[in-house]
Image: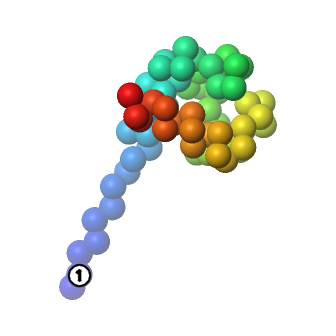
Amino acid sequence: MEKIIGIDLDEVLSETVDGVLKFHNYQINGIPAHKEDISDYYIFNIEKYNLNKEDAIKYFRVFLDE
């Protein structure tokens, strides 16, 4: 019987989002943002931030490259 291992990353990703928001002074596209405001896995799907997919990737990439 083959074993399959699953990993729950929700809390890890949530903590990453908080770090990214702090790095960007709790703003997304110039709009105030806090962890509680993130209601979708993809921030470009949250209309109030007016981000396209490419800009959302850049937003995280700047944090990851530091």
Q: Which residue is drawn at 44% across and 25% down?
A: 19
Q: Residue at x 57, y 43 (%)?
A: 57
Residue at the extreme bottom of the image, as rendered: 1
Q: Residue at x 33, y 55 (%)?
A: 7
Q: Where 54 falls versus 29 (above or below)?
A: below
Residue closer to the observer: 37 or 47: 47
Task: Determine the secondary structure under disc 1.
Answer: loop
Give x and y (percent) for residue 23: 47, 20
Say which residue label 1 marks: 2
Give x and y (percent) for residue 2: 23, 81
> In the image, 49: left or right of 58?
right
Residue 58 seen in the figure:
yes
Rendered image quadrant of residue 49: top right
Q: Where 38 falls versus 26 (above or below)?
A: below
Residue 18 seen in the figure:
no
Q: Residue at x 23, y 75 (%)?
A: 3
Q: Quadrant of the N terminus?
A: bottom left
